[in-house]
Every structure is written in C-alpha cells, then in structure tokens.
Amino acid sequence: MANIKIFGGSSHQDLSQKIADRLGLELGKVVTKKFSNQETCVEIGESVRGEDVYIVQSGCGEINDSLMELLIMIDACKIASASRVTAVIPCFPYARQDKKDKGGAPISAKLVANMLSVAGADHIITMDLHASQIQGFFDIPVDNLYAEPAVLKWIRENISEWRNCTVVSPDAGGAKRATSIAHRLHVAFALIHKERKKANEVDRMVLVGDVKDRVAILVDDMADTCGTICHAADKLLTAGAARVYAILTHGIFSGPALARINSACFEAVVVTNTIPQEGKMKHCSKIQAIDISMILAEAIKRTHNGESVSYLFSHVPL
C-alpha cells in the first residue's frame, strides 16, 4: 500500500508489530524517551509529509503516560504535514467515566475525546467501547470495532458442547453484546442483575434465565479487579451450570484479579490482546488470549482504501 505509515506507541509494541506484519508494512521509526523530570519526549524518525498515518497505542500499562505519548505523537505527525492521522486505540482509556452519575463527577471520556481532537487526530479506530455513546463525544469519525467475530470463532473451536450453552451477560449494560453472540450461535441467553454499594464491589446478584446442566459463557467488554465475573461464576455454578467460561475483550486484571481468577471455578478466562497478556498468563494458567490484530489491520486497510469499515462487524476473515 502506498502513502501509508504505521507507528507503534510504547504501550503495546507486540500488537503494533502484528498489525504491521499483517499489512506487509514496516513499523515507522519513532523514539520515545523521558526527561529527568518525567516529561515525555517523542521524535518521529522519518518523513510523514503527505502520508496517511496510523498510530497504534492502547490505553493500558501506565495509562496517563500512554495517553500523553499518543497525543504528542499525533501532534508531531500533524506538524510534520501528514495528510491524515488516525489514532488506533484498541482499549480506549477512561472509557468507564462516560457519564455524570453523581454530583461533582467528571465525564473523563469526553475530556479524552476533546484532547485527541485538539492534538490533531482526524479519525479514531477503537474496539468494544465500554459505552457506544462515547462515539458521540467526538466531532471526527470514530470506528468502534467489535471482537465478536474472533469470540465466535474461539467458542466454536474450543468449546465442544457450545451448542448446549447459555451466553450470560454479567450486568444489564452488556445485554446487547451477549444477546448478539447468543443469536449468532443460536443458543439461549441469560442475564445477571447486580447491585453495587461502591465501585469495584458488588453487593447482590440475581440470575435471570436458565443455566442448569448447560455450559455458561460469561461475556463482557472488560474485567478489572474481576470481582464481578468471579461472583457471577459462583452464582452460575450454584444455579446448576455444568461449566463456566468467561470471554472478555479487554483484560485489565489489576489488583487482586489474578488471585481471584486462580481461585474461581472458571474452565478458562479468554481475553483479546488489546492489552498485553503475556506476563499475566504466566501467573494464571486459566487466562487465554485471542489475537485481534487481523481485525485492526483490516480496518486500517479499508480506511486507507476509502472502503466501509462497518463490514468488519461480522465478516472479518480470521
């Protein structure tokens, strides 16, 4: 492909390289360093004049540093006369702060959207936003891709009894995602209603649906401390589920998450590689990773060629 450059930020270099390899391109040269006062410095090591530039940077690790690095890279490419700059953000930072749910609360996802636009981004490619409304925070095009094709492929290839399963959403917010997967598999759907006393702590859970003697597949967009999915797994097992799997797009796994997964009743906890998982997989044998670089690479290819990206929502070749 002509007139295209791909740069990878420091947050997830492995995914950046996989995307470049699938496109048959070399990653652009970029040097990232910190001054002694911890300011981030980014230098683009090659000409981007007139080029269609894609910068891959996920919202993980040291999230604030990763975000600042992305903003500086966007600005550096814009002032170097790139024709278009697309930020490829597999895991969108601050996505859970998407609404003003109490007095004095910020809408930080909107702030991040404004920062990306002001930095000079012309287009955003992301995956499984925590809330679809975040797309409306931008005045530039946003393509919210879905990991669903990769998830369906994994289920069919790795769960022998998938025809006798129930897809379960651990909360009302994820019902649309879970029902879509259940519809594609032609299986039943269930929902867990949860009540929280405060963030990251679930007070009570109520199962709506039948999982008795069936394989239960919990589906969600992300898991952080894993309190919700581990409580949900216990609830499903108590309700008579034969086996329990969890499939998540973004495996954040902070704090006590790995210890909770290790002691939980999961057959497997499956995540995509929007966030690096190699280190976590070494400490938790239940975690498995699905590569979604093909979905992102295809989105970049179609964007560059001026083709529709919405086709990827269900027909990406894996």
Image: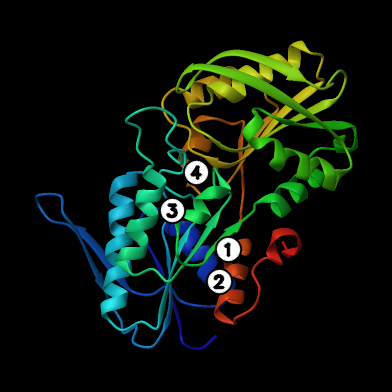
Q: Residues within 10 Å of mark 2 (few under 14, many from 20)?
A: many
Labels 4 & 2 near each other (Cβ < 8 A): no
Q: Secondary structure at mark 2?
A: helix
Indicate the position of residue 82 as horizontal and vertical percent values. Answer: 36, 82
Q: Amino acid under label 4?
A: Glu
Which mark sits nearer the N-terminus, 1 or 4? 4
Q: Which mark is residue 278?
A: 4
Mark 1 surroundings: few (<14), some (14-19) or many (≥20) residues within 10 A: many
Residue at position x 64%, y 78% from top? 307
Q: x%, y% of residue 138?
A: 45, 59
Residue with the mark numbered 3: 58
Secondary structure found at label 1: helix
Q: Amino acid at mark 1?
A: Leu
**Which residue occupies 85% across, 37% down?**
162
Q: Earlier in the sequence, mark 1 or mark 3?
A: 3
Mark 1 in CB contact with mark 2 (< 8 angstroms): yes
| Residue at which label 1 appears | 296
Depicted 207 relative to depicted 129: above or below: above
Q: Position of residue 191 (x, y in %)?
A: 73, 26
Real-space CA distance between mark 1 and mark 4, rounded to the nearest whole angstrom: 20 Å
Given residues 282 and 135, the one toward you in this image is 135
> Disc 3 versus disc 4: distance between alpha carbons?
15 Å
Identify which amino acid the numbered label 2 is placed on. Answer: Ile
Q: Is residue 180 left or right of residue 10?
A: right
Q: Amino acid at mark 3?
A: Ser
Among numbered discs 3 and 4, the one appearing first in the sequence: 3
Distance in Å between CA atoms under marks 1 and 3: 12 Å
Query: Which is closer to the viewer, label 4 or label 2?
Result: 2
Give the image location of residue 187, x and y in percent.
87, 37
Q: Is residue 145 above or below residue 300?
A: above
The answer to whether residue 90 of the structure is visible from this angle is no
Q: Tell me the mark number nearer the camera, choosing from 1 and 4.
A: 1
